[in-house]
Each structure stands twice: as C-alpha cells, then as structure tokens.
Amino acid sequence: MSALFDADQLRTFVAIAETGSFTRAADVVHKTQSAVSMQMKRLEERVGRPVFVRDGRASRLTEDGERLLGYARRIVKLNMEAAATFADATLTGRVCLGVPDDYADRYLPEIMARFSATHPSVEFTVICEPTSELVERVRAGTVDLAIITYTEDAARNAQLIRRERLLWVSSARHAVHLETPVPLGLGRPTCQWRHVALSRLAGAGRAHRVLYTSPNCGAVSAAVLAGLAISVFPESALRPGMRVLGAADGYPPLPPCDIALLRNRHEPSPLADALAQHIIQGLDNLTEADAAE
C-alpha cells in the first residue's frame, strides 16, 4: 500500500501555490523557510516528481503540481473541518469580518447564524465596504478577514472560494436596455465590475453613458429596478423584478465573478480561523466542481 499524503505538507503546498513564494508561504503556515523547503522535498519524494519550478524569485506549479493542488485543497479543507468539529466551542473574544454589500444580503445571514450557533460567546463585527477598501483594511490589520471580489492586487494572498456568473441586468418592467446611448448604473471608478462593463461595451461598439454611480449595491439596484439604468451583478445579487440581458439583447458576454477570502496574516487567531472555515463551508462551490472533473 502506498504511503498516505501528509496533511501538514499539503497545507504548506497550498500556501506556496496561493502566495507564489516559499518565503511568503512560510509566514502563512508559521514555519521557517528551511522547514517549508524540507516539507516540499519530502512531498516531491512522495509524489515521485517535481511539483514546483522556479520562475525568477517566484515558484510556479508544474503540470503534476496543478493536478495535486485540487486534491490538496480538498484534503486540507476536510482536515480543518474535522478539527473544527471537535474543537473547543467556548472560544471567546472579538472577530471582525469585512464584506462588500454586494454579497452581504446573500451570504451574511447564513454565515452569522452558523458561526453564532457554534461560538455564542464571540462578539462578531461586520464592516461593509468595497473590495478595494477591505483589502487595505486587512493589510492594516483592522479587519481579521474579508470576503472580496478576487482581484490581481489581492490575488497572491487571497483564497479563491467561489465562482459565479457576472450578468447584465435590467428592469423586467422597462425597456431601458434598448436606449442609445444605454444608461448605466455602476460602482465607483475603482470598481472592477465597472471596468469590465465599460470595456466590454466599448469593445462591442455599443454607445453608453454612466448615469448613476454608487458604492452601494442597494442604490444601484434601485436605479435598475426603477428602469433608469442597466448594470452588472453577480448571479447571487439578482433580485425579483430584474431581467438578465444576453447576446440576443445586444450585450456582450462577461467574465465570471470570482469571490475570495482574504485573511489578516499578521495577526492570525483561532477565532478568525474558525470563522474562515464557516465561510468556506458555506460559499465554496469550486472544490465540488474540481471533484466533478
């Protein structure tokens, strides 16, 4: 019988894959760089082939490393779930979660209910701000962890946990999507979805103008439902009274919306780890997709 994989080695392997660096991964898993290197040497001996190659100062996965990553994430996730199941439920203290309001209505109720049921003595603080501001808060250490829209800026440290369709939406009771130029309701100029929407319309040669701007998802939704503008929303943010627009309506396809979990690596805590596991268990739709493949 072949030797089983070591879960701690796989956790380090995942950290390197997500940070792109043995040095940064060492900080994440709280080990020395030499210990991380030794773990990966033993992992490669177990696999029987290299899982990383050097790319300048960074480390990238080999083809075999890519194959192993999906399994490693699932094993580490199950290991942490099992540990959390038997962990002391009497944790106390404070934990602060950041989340854009695009996701708050859809995901917060379940996350808060599950976490509060298992950790009733914990003071749970939620801050709703756009992704760009939450990234800065996590870096500054004022937020323990944040659910964010996956961006290049946060990619090295963020854990991708969910993928949804990003959709053009309009009011089901109005024909504002037929207007020329088409009026848009979007987030602030720093909003990733705003950039995507404007670039796709420009690429399709569709005349447009930004009529409403707000960092608040509810305000943009109100403009859409009132028939004043169209916008782009992830599938989970759709509301009754909205109509999804597609190629038949003259709107170009959009890239998927990737949702990630960003943690404060400077001040890790058991509370933040416990909350992270509740979030991953509630939102993750990528592990199952990997397993199906």
Image (cartoon, helix red, strand yellow):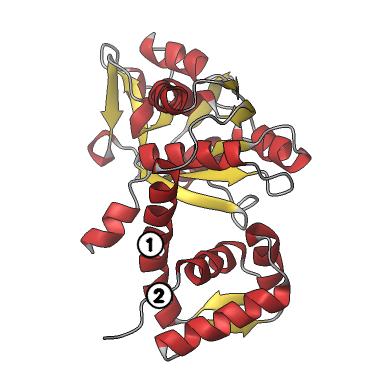
Q: Residue at x 45, y 13 (%)?
A: 223
Q: Are marks 2 and 1 in contact (CB under 8 Å)?
A: yes
Quickly name the residue at label 2: 5
Looking at the picture, which amino acid does disc 2 mark?
Phe
> Residue at horizontal 28%, vertical 53%?
288
Residue at the far top in the pictured view = 226
Is 245 displayed left or right of 64 in the figure? Answer: left
First in sequence: mark 2 vs mark 1: 2
The residue sitting at 37% across, 54% down in the picture is 78
Residue visible at 74% across and 48% down in the picture: 266
Q: As rendered, which of 43 and 197 lies closer to the eye?
A: 43
State which quarter of the image contains the C terminus.
bottom left
Q: Measure the C-alpha gap from mark 2 to mark 1.
A: 9 Å
Pick the front one: 123 or 171: 123
| For residue 160, side relative to residue 240 (left or right) | right
- Between 8 and 212, the residue placed more toward the observer is 8
Q: Label 1 amino acid?
A: Ile
SS of the residue at dot 1? helix
Image coordinates of residue 201 in percent, x first then y, are: 45, 40
Compared to residue 223, the image places residue 144 above or below, namely: below
